[in-house]
Each structure stands twice: as structure tokens, then as C-alpha cells.
């Protein structure tokens, strides 16, 4: 049996004998946690949720029982998870809004939005969300890029494919700002639907509006030609050539009138579709200023620090006992290690700017 081997009972006894060290480490950990709970700035969490109204449901879309079944949120969610095709626009799914809320464009708009200054308590628009993050950078674009990354970490979006519910949580240093910023993010989503999602319908409506104006002008020109023909030829029924000309003018008027009515009907339909094809954001729960801060939580931090400190104290005591046992078993190596460590510390201390100046002054006085 190797008598120099440290057994567990001896290690436990040595660690218990160092109980003062263990208690000091545990107490220091708890004291550090208490200091952090006081020093760290508070963080409040604003929570809001919304659902999207499907276009087909708002327009009373038919298609029979099968199309109605496919439009059900649960069935469409399962189909999207399985990768099956669906008649629903993918940009109307909750997963799209999750990506939209985390996009750089929407986060940039949110950062540049103005809110009442929470530090001054003034009413009305006061400061931007970007200025409350206190990012110190001379380059505005770089500061905005850093703010987008920081805001993306503070914001969390969860979706429920069965109910199409989107839940947004946003952390901020002030309670009112957290609620206002979360509500503003949902408002930006609604503005995105109104501004960006209707681009195709607006382009079609603009094209049809131009064609309707051109068709109306053409119809008026043909009607004016027919009117001029009747004014110049009062007895056109007695001339075969004038009868043929009258039939030609009638066909032109009928063709222009049919084209104008068709374009006019399509134009009115496009104007209606421009509104109906925009997904509607229905807010389920608007964010309200939370009364309790999300972080730091002093009680949780102290309990965690007490458990962690106890473990660190026990580990420190056991490590000290192991180090002493090794030094007793290997005195030459321990002495070499102490000498080397002391020399390195002296060299490092001498390399410091203040200590270097003092050493030079002492050398100059000695000379």
C-alpha cells in the first residue's frame, strides 16, 4: 500500500479543517451577488400578442368544404410542418411574422421610433429607442448595427401554428418603455402590411387606372366622330356608302364601350382587392407596463449564489488540502514552484509603469 496516497477520509478531514476558507468563499460569493443585484440596472419585460386574419376568410372565400378545411389553422399548421402544399399565402403564416419581427428593417424602424423619455417622465415624443441603449460609437451606422443586434437579443417571438397566435416579448430598462416598444413593434407590422404587402395590388390598380382613362378617351373620340357624322349627313339612310360608314362607326362605338366597361369593372375590383388582400393584425393582448422587473431578482440571485458559493468553498478547501499534501510529498518541486512564482511576480511588478519609474529613481539616487 502506498502510504503517500491521499485517501478520501483524509481529504474530507483536511477540507473540514479549512472550514473558515470555505465559509469565506461562500460569503464572498453571496456578497458579490448582493452587490450585483444592487448595481445591475433593472430590466422590465413588455408582452403583447396578436393574430392575423386570413384573406380568404375575410372575403368569405368559398371553394367548398375541402377549402374550408384547408383554411383551418390547425390543419394548415400541420400541412406546413409536413411540407405539403397549401393555397394559403406563406407570407400570411405566423412563422413569417416571426421572421419579420426579427428582420433588420423592422428593428431599425423600431430603434428610430420616438417614445416618451422615461428618464425625465415628460409627456409626448421625447427620445428614440436607440438613444436609450447608450451605445457609444462615432459611426452612426455602426451604432445602429450594434443596436439592432442588441435589440434582437432582448426581443423574443413565439408562434403557435394551431391558433396563428404570435407572442412578442421585449425587455427594456424602464417599465413604460418596454410596453410602448412592444406595442410599437406590432404597429410596425401592421404598417408593413399596409405599405408593402399591397404593392402588387396597387401596381395592378395603377395600370388599370391608366387603361381606363385611355379607353374613356378613345370612347369619347369615337362618339364624337359618330356625332359629327350625323351632323354632316342628315339623310344618310338614302346613301349605301353612308349606311356602311354608319355601321362601321357603330361597331367602333360598341367595341370602345365594351372595352371601357370591362376595364372599369376590373379597376373597381382591383381597388377592392387592394384593401381585402391586406392581412389584418388583430391585437389579442396589448402590452401594459409591468409592475415587477424581470431582472435582476435579488432573492433568486442570493439563493443561487449561496448554493454556488457552498460548492466553490468546498472545492477551494479540498483544492488547498490537495495542494498541501502534494507539497509535503514533493518538497523540492514545491520549493522550485514557489521560487519561480515569486520571481515572476517581482518581474511583473517591476514592469508596471509606476513601479518602473520608482525603480529608475532609486537607481538614479544610488548613482
Image (cartoon, rainbow, N blue to C red):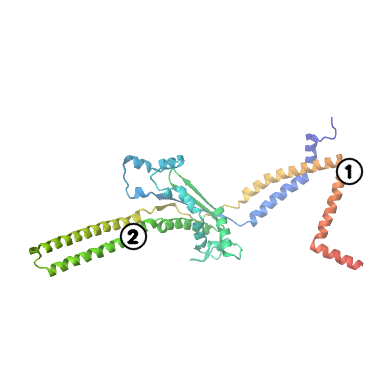
Label 1: how many residues lie within 10 Å, few (<14), some (14-19) or many (20+)? few
Q: Reading the chain from its start, which is encountered first: label 1 or label 2?
A: 2
Residue tagged 2: 207
Quadrant of the image occupied by residue 83: top left
Seen in the picture, residue 8 relative to 251 is either above or below; the reply is above
100 displayed left or right of 344: left
Q: Secondary structure at mark 2?
A: helix
Residue 102: x and y in percent read 51, 53
Of 274 and 311, the residue lying toward us: 274
Q: Name the foreground residue: 214 vs 72.
A: 214
Residue 343, given in percent of the width and then of the height, sits at 85, 53
Residues 134 and 55: in front is 55
User: Which-is-in-front pick, marks 1 and 2?
Assistant: 2
Q: Alpha-carbon neighbours of circle 2 within 10 Å: few (<14), some, or many (≥20)?
A: few
Extreme-bottom residue of the structure? 232
Residue that mark 1 sits on: 332
Q: Quadrant of residue 223?
A: bottom left
Question: Does residue 357 appear left or right of residue 310 in this picture?
Answer: right
Q: Secondary structure at mark 1?
A: helix
Q: Residue furthest front?
A: 241
Q: CA distance from mark 1 to mark 2?
A: 93 Å
Judging depth in this view, the residue of 180 and 113 nearest the camera is 113
Q: Is residue 340 visible?
A: yes
Marks 1 and 2 in Cβ contact (< 8 Å): no
Q: Give the percent coordinates (x, y) of residue 244.
A: 14, 61
Identify which residue is drawn at 72% across, 47% down.
26
Q: Quadrant of the N terminus?
A: top right
In the rendered image, residue 346, in percent from the top left (x then y), is placed at: 84, 56
On the rendered structure, is 291 left or right of 36?
left
Residue at 92 percent of width and 66 percent of height: 366
Amino acid at each position: 500500500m502506498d502510504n503517500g496516497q491521499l485517501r478520501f477520509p483524509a481529504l474530507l478531514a483536511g477540507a473540514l479543517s479549512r472550514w473558515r476558507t470555505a465559509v469565506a468563499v461562500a460569503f464572498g460569493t453571496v456578497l458579490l451577488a448582493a452587490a450585483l443585484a444592487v448595481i445591475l440596472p433593472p430590466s422590465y419585460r413588455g408582452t403583447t400578442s396578436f393574430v392575423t386574419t386570413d384573406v380568404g376568410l375575410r372575403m368569405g372565400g368559398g371553394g367548398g368544404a375541402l377549402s374550408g378545411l384547408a383554411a383551418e389553422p390547425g390543419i394548415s399548421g400541420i400541412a406546413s410542418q409536413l411540407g405539403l402544399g397549401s393555397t394559403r399565402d406563406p407570407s400570411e403564416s405566423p412563422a413569417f411574422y416571426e421572421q419579420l419581427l426579427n428582420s433588420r428593417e423592422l428593428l431599425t424602424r423600431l430603434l428610430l421610433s420616438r417614445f416618451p423619455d422615461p428618464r425625465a417622465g415628460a409627456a409626448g415624443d421625447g427620445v428614440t429607442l436607440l438613444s436609450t441603449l447608450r451605445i457609444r460609437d462615432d459611426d452612426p451606422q455602426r451604432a445602429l448595427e450594434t443596436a439592432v443586434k442588441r435589440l434582437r437579443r432582448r426581443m423574443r417571438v413565439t408562434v403557435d401554428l394551431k391558433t396563428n397566435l404570435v407572442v412578442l416579448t421585449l425587455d427594456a430598462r424602464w417599465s413604460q418603455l418596454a410596453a410602448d416598444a412592444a406595442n410599437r413593434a406590432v404597429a410596425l407590422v401592421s404598417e408593413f402590411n399596409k405599405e408593402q404587402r399591397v404593392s402588387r395590388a396597387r401596381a395592378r390598380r395603377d395600370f388599370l387606372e391608366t387603361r381606363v382613362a385611355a379607353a374613356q378617351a378613345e370612347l369619347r373620340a369615337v362618339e364624337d366622330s359618330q356625332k359629327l357624322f350625323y351632323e354632316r349627313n342628315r339623310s344618310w339612310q338614302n346613301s349605301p356608302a353612308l349606311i356602311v360608314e354608319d355601321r362601321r362607326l357603330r361597331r367602333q362605338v360598341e367595341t370602345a364601350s365594351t372595352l371601357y366597361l370591362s376595364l372599369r369593372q376590373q379597376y373597381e375590383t382591383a381597388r377592392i382587392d387592394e384593401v381585402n388582400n391586406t392581412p389584418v393584425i388583430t391585437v389579442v393582448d396589448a402590452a401594459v407596463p409591468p409592475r415587477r422587473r424581470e431582472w435582476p431578482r435579488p432573492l433568486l440571485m442570493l439563493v443561487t449564489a449561496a448554493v454556488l458559493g457552498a460548492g466553490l468553498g468546498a472545492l477551494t478547501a479540498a483544492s488547498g488540502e490537495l495542494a498541501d499534501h502534494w507539497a509535503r510529498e514533493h518538497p523540492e518541486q514545491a520549493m522550485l514552484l514557489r521560487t519561480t512564482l515569486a520571481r515572476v511576480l517581482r518581474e511583473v511588478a517591476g514592469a508596471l509603469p509606476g513601479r518602473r519609474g520608482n525603480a529608475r529613481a532609486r537607481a538614479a539616487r544610488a548613482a
